[in-house]
Amino acid sequence: MSGMIIAVVSVLQLTGADVVISVAGDTATVAAAYQMRDTVDSVRVVLIRIPDQSLRVIAPSFVRPVVRRGLYEFTVASTARNTLSLRYRVSGDLRRIPVAIPSLPTMPGAGVVSIVVEGLPDSVALDDAFPRLIWQEAGRAAATLDNLPSFVRVTATSTVFSASNFTTVAALLLLVGSGLWWLRRRVLTRSRNDP
Amino acid sequence: MGLTLPIVLIVYFGLILGIAIWSAFQTKTETDFIVAGRTIGPLVGGAVLAATQISAGTVVGTVGRHYLTGISWWYIWFGLWAGWLVSAFFVAPKLRRFGALTVPDYVGARFGSEKARVLAAVLIIISYTIYLVAQFQASGEIALAIFGIEPIVAMLILLSSTAIYTLLGGVRSSSYIEFLQTLIMVTGLVVAVPVLLEKAGGFSQSVTFLRSLDVRLIGWYYGPKELAAFGIAFGLSIAAAPYEMTRFYSMRDERTVRQAIMICIGFQVVIGLSVMALGMLTRVLFPNLASEDQASSIMAFEVLPPFVGALLLVAMISAIMSTVNSILLVTGASVAHDLYGRFIRPKSSQAHLVFVNRLSIVILAIIPLYFALQKLSDVQSIVVEQTKFIASFFFVPVVIGLNWRHGTAAGAIASMIGGFFACLIWELTGQHGFAQHGIDAVEVGVATSLVLFVVVSRFTKRVPAENLAVFFKKTNGEGATEER
């Protein structure tokens, strides 16, 4: 069973994460603070790398991410009281804004991750946002989660033809249609078998 | 998710209750209760076989395994489908032709031995009780992740709702309910994939991210030897799985059984691909979950549109319920029909046997609750382990026994006991060196079982010709028979 026993990354855990994303024009600035349960010297952090987008770490200022095809990767030393703070700027295509993910699982339990997005235009639709964001006030939306998402996504405008609505209708049609098809097939089979 | 989830759950449980009550009025004899009066057609039969095999191990464990290890786990499905094909051509038609009520019925009749029947019944009860542990544990994981309620509460709700429809209508209600559950599972899983893909930024973006995260996620996390071992375990066990074999008895005829297996494979291809995609795409969206077993419920609750998410949650509940239901039917029948009805009160009335069956179901459902609360391992590992044991003690007496006329009662008993203990001993000792020698416990178990079956059968008393006639159509006297 050696192949079956798989450790889940580490025994260390994130006990909290506060991510604030400020959007201004075609630039977003992300301030992220992470709390850990135990003392740790440094943590590996990854960010998803999205095409047509550039990313620059502002703080800690000495960090130069290793750029891979699909992600940025770097190691950050933790500060006092088991916290980890990061600031980075994203520019270009802002439909998906990467969230820095420390290589630690979040502690099981409700709402240890808080995400706030500021500076959103009023035309933005949150129906298809990822993660599920809720308007707090004009231009500011927030989400509380159990786990860190790899990015935050908001769509440009609201439409009835959203992916969410489309899949809901598709699921309903599939269910009802297949049920009716089976009933019709059953009735036909029965009438054929009747003497 | 707001009101969507409660509404979907109310509609779902309402439909289940309706089908169960309708079935209860149709169930009058033990044959009605255990094999639905042998009236199930290919489409419902195929859906039933798929739903029975798709369990918590699939919708929670396999999604979690793909989340953690990527694409390579998918290859084990080929072993499973190979097992289905073996069943379709070498097992199911002969069993359906025999037309018994339970799998120990087959063992007792084929080998002309009540001892072999009892042993089969006892091994089935033990191994499937372990399987129930995984199902209950998965329901606890889902409940904790989604509703934040204690696992024991979720397990009791699942147990009582499943027990109600199992007790009311037996195989008839469970067959139509499992048809509904398969529809929900397939719809929920298939619709969820494009949603996740769109959220994750498309196929290319997702693959690139996963490859950068860990190159093994889109390559070989498991080596070919490990995958072969798991695939063989699933294939061998599905070819001779008592909870599936019992369902063959409920279908109209041999042709229906073959058609149903092909339809089942079709459903499982769709489900297998969807589950793989969902696990890996959830990794793109949430790269560092605390437990891989939470991947499916977090995806349903935090990523999908409310209705699709609710549907997927219902699909997970359905998968668990359908498997729990099938296991309870098999173990309940083993106790009531094979042990109680044969040895304790052989002259029991039909009504009394149905009552004992129902009582056994209640008792056998409560035992695994204790072990599920201990959380001895992750869901998929429990499923894999149980699968290995089933294959080790049952594959040879069923698949070889149905196709090799020289197998004897002593051979079958030796093969079941030997296979079980060989698997157990290898698990506790030799398995630790799996990475070096690449020999899994299931291979040791089945090989031991096969050798014992052949060798012991060669030197022991042959099975009477009348016992073999139904399985090997043409007999030439003295127990030696020929396939026509």
Image (spheres, rainbow, N blue to C red):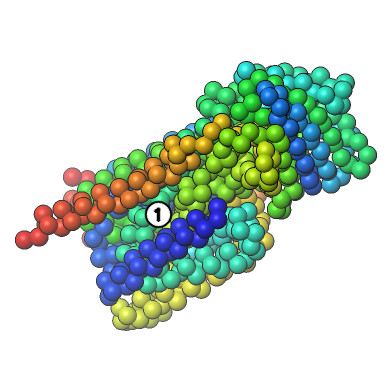
Residue at the location (81% across, 29% down)?
Answer: A87
**Image vertical order of residue A195 relative to residue B259, above or below:** below
- Asked whether the viewer can see residue B184, the reply is yes
Q: Which residue is mark 1?
A: B181
Q: Nearer the viewer, residue B319 or A151?
A: A151
Badge 1 marks a residue whose secondary structure is helix
- Asked whether the viewer can see residue B450, the reply is no
**Image vertical order of residue B296 relative to residue B211, above or below:** below
Q: Nearer the viewer, residue B390 or B405?
A: B390
Residue at the location (59% across, 35% down)?
Answer: A124
Q: Nearer the viewer, residue A154 or B384?
A: A154
Residue at the location (56% across, 31% down)?
Answer: A156
Q: Quadrant of the C terminus of chain B?
A: top left
User: Quick check: B323 left or right of B256?
Assistant: right
* Label 1 chain ID: B
The quadrant where residue B52 appears:
bottom left
Q: Nearer the viewer, residue A64 or B438?
A: A64
Total marks drawn? 1
Label 1 packing within 10 angstroms: few (<14), some (14-19), many (20+): many
Q: What amino acid is found at the position of numbered circle 1 in the picture?
A: Gln
**Position of residue A46 measured from the top left corner of the image (x, y, whole percent):** 73, 29
**Image vertical order of residue B236 relative to residue B319, above or below:** above
**Image vertical order of residue B269 relative to residue B13, above or below:** above
Residue at the location (63% across, 53% down)?
Answer: B145
Task: Spot the residue most to the left.
Answer: A195
**Position of residue B182 measured from the top left corner of the image (x, y, whole percent):** 39, 51
The quadrant where residue B223 appears:
top right
**Position of residue B457 measured from the top left corner of the image (x, y, whole percent):** 39, 52
User: Quick check: B163 left or right of B145?
Assistant: left
**Position of residue B450 measured from the top left corner of the image (x, y, whole percent):** 44, 46
User: Quick check: B239 left or right of A70?
Assistant: left
